[in-house]
Structures are given as structure tokens and as C-alpha cells.
Image (cartoon, rainbow, N blue to C red):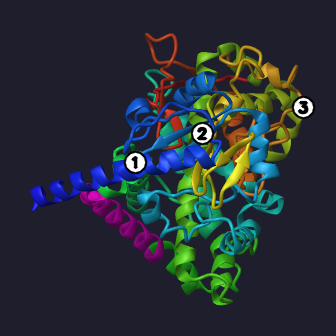
């Protein structure tokens, strides 16, 4: 059976090569394609550039081929944009033309072929999902309703660190406790639920399943079957695992969280202040027939991945940079002590009075962007970009990390220097007002989670800095900030042990 499959595969590869050569010649006459390395039949540029198309490798290719270049990855066209002007074209000026999402075999499994909001094509379904998610999640009103909960969760982290005798001596991997905090921040919004401890069985199960989902989706292991569809039969085992994880996760959401909200009744007050949970709003939309039950599940799937982990990565990067730059940490502490008073805990309304803390948050997002290539875009139809023809259904990547780290646009971009956002770049914000700095994207498909992420980052980093001296473990001068990337993510390679010594006031 395997020999027969191999024989069919080899024959298909040969036929694909013939077709690819023919199409290449025809396209050469029809299209003015962006520059790029010369592709070979069947594999395109895949063997030349490899699987790991991370932000740094793509930046190196941009230096060679220009601000827009084309890679042929098997049968997929991949267009990479690396200048603020072209980013504006993709995300804003031609936001409709490039407003769809390219998916792959694994993301199709985890999102039900685009039944969610993040990976659905641009159109009526996306507009409906975005509207339904905005009111319960992504407004200033939501921030004001839930900020006290975020402050409470940050206070719990501080208290737990103070009660851990090892934290001030040999140190602790604080990421684990911050992960619980982030789950509580988002599950309080979604379901008015929280997990009491790191040992909570439901939290452990949820964390494990979400972690496995992220590992499977972000891996490069399945690219060969995605780039060359005739090789997809060899992915059966991998895709089977993905389907099992997906089904188990969705059933967990359904049994322990969504079902509870439905049983409770969405018309009743659900917390001490009588606020409805986000899930109550979403279930109401389902009852009105605006979305179906699967859409509800995939909204929860999006929040578990997009809102929790990405913000956690940024907090972890921020702490690492504060540890490795004690002079920056000292300035944050001085600002907090001076503006608020020694020992007065920072709250969300205080953030506007703390420009240096805000600059630290922006510098973390610039240098250590959680989604450095943003979520990939796609043009459903043939389009023009930068004077070139872009074939229909091309995967379009905006290298947002390079926009924010290109020395042509930024002074000494490799340095972690928050002062840049108080001096030469004082007018640059994280909301996309400058196309050199797009940590959340901009335009129709921008990340709406910016409205939650920025205050949570400010509160968390602020509380930890004002309560503790953040230091590397004994015997180390710095902590390791090596990067680990995925299909389009960036987080720290090793979850660092940090020493947290309580400050005296």
C-alpha cells in the first residue's frame, strides 16, 4: 500500500513539475511579478529558503530583493512586504482587496475552515463576527468594567510572590503564575469565572490543551503537505492528532463554560455589579439567529489563543528586558514612586500619568513583537501592489517587526531604549498612527485586543516593578532572551527564572 502511494506521489510530482513549468512560462508573459529568488519546479523556493520564514530571515531577504518580494513555496505564492508605504497599501489603502485571510491545513481544522473571526475571509461573516465580539470584549466600557478585576489579579500575583520564600533567593519561573493571571483576566470577562490556583484541575486541563493546540498550529512540521498538496496523505497522522485536540478542546469549552452560561440564563445579573458576561452577549446573538453554535465555540477558541498567550508573551518579554536593563527598571520605579507615592499601587487610570512606563510597554512591543509578521493577509482576486501584479489567493505577509527595527527608520533599533518614545518618536503610538510601528496591525483586520492588552501590560509590569527588584538568578548577570518563533509568533525560548526581592518603602 505504501509503495503504491509512493508511486502515485512520484507520478503526481512529475506531472506537477510539467504543469508548473508551463504555468511559469505563461505567467512570465502575463504578469509583472515581484522580484525574488528563482523558483524550481514543484518545490519553488522552499528548498532555498527553508521552513523557518521568521521575521529575521525575511528581513535578510528584503535587504537582497527589496521592500516587496515573492517566494514560491511549493504551489503557494508568498508575498512579503517590508516598507511602511507598502504596509499602508496592504492594510489601509487596499484594505478590502487584501482583507482576506490565507489559511492552511492545520488552521482549517482548528477554526472549522474559518468559522471564527481571526481566520475567516473578508466579507459578511467576518463583519458579523467582529460586530458581535466588539461590544462584550473590545470597548473602553469593557476596560472600565473589568479593570478592577485585572488590578485584583495583579495584586494576587504580587502576594503569591511575596509568600514564596524562594522568589527572593534562588528565584522563580514567574511566567507560570502570570499565565494563571491571564487566564483569570480573560475568563472573568468571558464567563465571570476564575481559577483559584495553579493546581486547579480544570485550569491544568485547559492549559495543556491550549498549549498543545498552539504547538501543533505553530509548528513547521506540516509545511510540506501545505505547500505541496499531493504530499498531504503523509500528514494523516499529524492531522488526526490536530482533530483530536480540536474536538477535545471544543467539548471542554462546551461542557464546562458555554453550557454553564446557557444554563444560568443570559437575562440574569451575573456578578456583584450586575454585569453580563461576554458569553451572555454572544449566546444572545446565537438565540437571535445571528450566529450558530459552532461560531460561538470558535469565538471562545480565538480568545483562548489570541488574547491570553500573546499578552502573556509580551509580559514575559517585558520582565526579561527590565531584568537585563536595571537602569530602565530603576527609572520605572522612580516614576511610580514619584507620581503615585511609594507603595501606592498602580491602577489603570494612573497609566496616563506614567509616560515612562508607557514608553517601556511600547519598546517591548517594538523590539519583541508577539506577532512579528502580523496575521497573514490574502487577496481573493488578482491585485496590484508596488507596481507589481499579485496573483489571486497569494499569502501576503507584512513584516511588522522589520518596519519597527529597520535602521533606515529607527535610531539604533537593536537597543532596548524606551526613551525613544519620549524623544524622537514621542508621537508614535501602538494604535497604528505610524506605519513604522504596527504591533497590532491597523485597518479592517487589525487586532481589536489592543484595547485590553495595553492596560493589562501596564498594570502587570507596573505592579511587579514597584513591588520588587527584578534580578537574574544567582551567578548570572543577565537572563537568556533567545527567541523562539512559530508560523507567525515570537516568544522567549526559555521561560526565565527571575529573582524578585521585595522593595522597602
Q: Give the range drawn in magenta.
A: 231-255
Residue 136 in view (yes/no): yes
Distance from the alpha carbon under mark 3 to that under mark 2: 22 Å
Q: Percent x, y for residue 408?
A: 75, 19
Query: Which quadrant of the view contains residue 80?
Result: top right
Foreground of the two, 314 or 204: 314
Foreground of the two, 129 or 160: 129
The quadrant in which the C terminus is found is: top right
Dot 3, crowdedness within 10 Å: few (<14), some or many (≥20)? few
Residue 464 in view (yes/no): no
Distance from the alpha carbon under mark 3 to that under mark 1: 37 Å
User: Which numbered disc flags the more N-terminal residue, 1 or 2?
Assistant: 1
Q: Name the residue under label 1.
A: 215
Q: In this view, does 333 lie to the left or right of 111?
A: right
Q: Percent x, y for residue 461?
A: 67, 34
- Residue at x 10% of width, y 56% of height: 3
Foreground of the two, 395 or 20: 20
Q: Mark 3 points at which residue?
A: 427
Dot 2, crowdedness within 10 Å: few (<14), some or many (≥20)? many
Disc assigned to residue 115: none
Q: Name the residue under label 2.
A: 370
Q: Is residue 144 magenta?
A: no
Q: Percent x, y for residue 281?
A: 69, 77
Q: Predominant secondary structure in magenta?
A: helix
Q: Percent x, y for residue 356?
A: 81, 26
Q: Does the magenta stretch include residue 234?
A: yes
Give the structural element (helix, strand or loop) at label 2. Answer: loop
Query: Which quadrant of the view contains residue 116?
Result: bottom right
List the single residue furthest toward the bottom: 288
Amino acid at each position: 500500500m505504501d509503495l503504491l502511494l509512493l508511486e502515485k506521489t512520484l507520478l503526481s510530482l512529475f506531472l506537477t513539475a510539467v504543469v508548473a513549468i508551463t504555468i511559469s512560462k505563461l505567467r512570465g508573459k502575463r504578469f509583472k511579478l515581484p522580484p525574488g529568488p528563482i523558483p524550481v519546479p514543484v518545490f519553488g523556493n522552499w528548498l532555498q529558503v527553508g521552513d523557518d520564514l521568521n521575521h529575521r530571515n525575511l528581513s535578510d531577504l528584503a535587504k537582497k530583493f527589496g521592500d516587496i518580494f515573492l517566494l514560491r513555496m511549493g504551489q503557494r505564492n508568498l508575498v512579503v512586504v517590508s516598507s511602511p508605504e507598502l504596509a499602508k497599501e496592504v492594510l489601509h489603502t487596499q484594505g478590502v482587496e487584501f482583507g482576506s485571510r490565507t489559511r492552511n491545513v492545520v488552521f482549517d481544522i482548528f477554526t472549522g475552515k474559518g468559522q471564527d473571526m481571526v481566520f475567516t475571509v473578508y466579507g459578511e461573516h467576518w463583519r458579523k463576527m467582529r460586530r458581535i465580539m466588539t461590544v462584550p470584549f473590545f470597548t473602553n466600557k469593557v476596560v472600565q468594567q473589568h479593570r478592577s478585576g485585572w488590578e485584583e489579579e495583579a495584586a494576587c500575583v504580587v502576594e503569591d510572590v511575596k509568600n514564596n520564600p524562594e522568589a527572593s533567593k534562588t528565584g522563580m519561573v514567574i511566567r507560570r503564575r502570570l499565565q494563571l493571571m491571564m487566564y483569570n483576566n480573560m475568563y472573568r470577562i468571558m464567563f465571570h469565572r476564575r481559577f483559584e490556583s495553579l493546581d486547579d484541575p480544570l485550569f491544568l486541563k485547559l492549559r495543556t490543551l491550549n498549549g498543545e493546540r498552539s504547538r501543533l498550529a505553530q509548528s513547521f512540521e506540516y509545511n510540506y503537505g501545505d505547500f505541496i498538496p499531493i504530499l498531504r496523505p503523509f500528514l494523516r497522522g499529524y492531522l488526526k492528532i490536530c482533530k483530536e485536540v480540536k474536538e477535545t478542546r471544543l467539548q471542554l469549552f462546551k461542557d464546562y463554560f458555554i453550557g454553564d452560561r446557557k444554563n444560568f440564563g443570559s437575562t440574569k445579573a451575573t456578578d456583584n455589579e450586575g454585569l453580563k458576561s461576554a458569553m451572555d452577549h454572544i449566546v444572545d446573538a446565537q438565540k437571535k439567529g445571528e450566529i450558530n453554535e459552532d461560531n460561538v465555540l470558535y469565538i471562545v477558541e480565538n480568545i483562548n489563543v489570541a488574547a491570553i498567550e500573546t499578552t502573556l508573551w509580551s509580559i514575559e518579554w517585558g520582565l526579561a528586558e527590565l531584568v537585563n536593563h536595571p537602569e530602565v527598571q530603576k527609572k520605572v520605579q522612580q516614576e511610580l514612586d514619584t507620581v503615585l507615592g511609594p507603595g501606592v499601587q498602580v491602577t489603570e487610570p494612573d497609566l496616563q500619568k506614567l509616560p515612562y512606563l508607557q514608553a517601556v510597554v511600547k519598546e517591548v512591543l517594538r523590539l519583541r513583537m508577539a506577532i512579528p509578521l502580523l496575521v497573514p493577509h490574502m487577496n481573493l482576486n488578482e491585485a496590484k501592489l508596488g507596481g507589481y501584479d499579485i496573483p489571486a489567493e497569494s499569502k501576503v505577509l507584512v513584516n511588522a517587526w522589520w518596519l519597527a527595527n529597520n535602521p533606515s527608520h529607527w535610531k539604533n533599533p537593536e537597543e532596548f531604549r524606551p526613551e525613544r518614545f519620549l524623544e524622537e518618536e514621542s508621537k508614535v503610538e501602538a494604535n497604528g498612527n505610524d506605519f513604522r510601528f504596527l504591533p497590532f496591525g491597523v485597518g479592517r483586520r487589525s487586532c481589536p485586543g489592543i484595547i485590553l492588552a495595553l492596560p493589562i501590560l501596564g498594570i502587570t509590569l507596573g505592579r511587579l516593578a514597584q513591588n520588587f527588584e527584578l534580578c537574574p538568578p544567582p551567578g548570572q548577570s543577565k537572563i537568556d532572551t533567545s527567541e523562539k518563533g512559530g508560523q507567525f509568533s515570537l516568544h522567549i525560548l526559555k521561560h526565565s527564572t527571575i529573582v524578585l526581592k521585595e522593595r522597602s518603602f
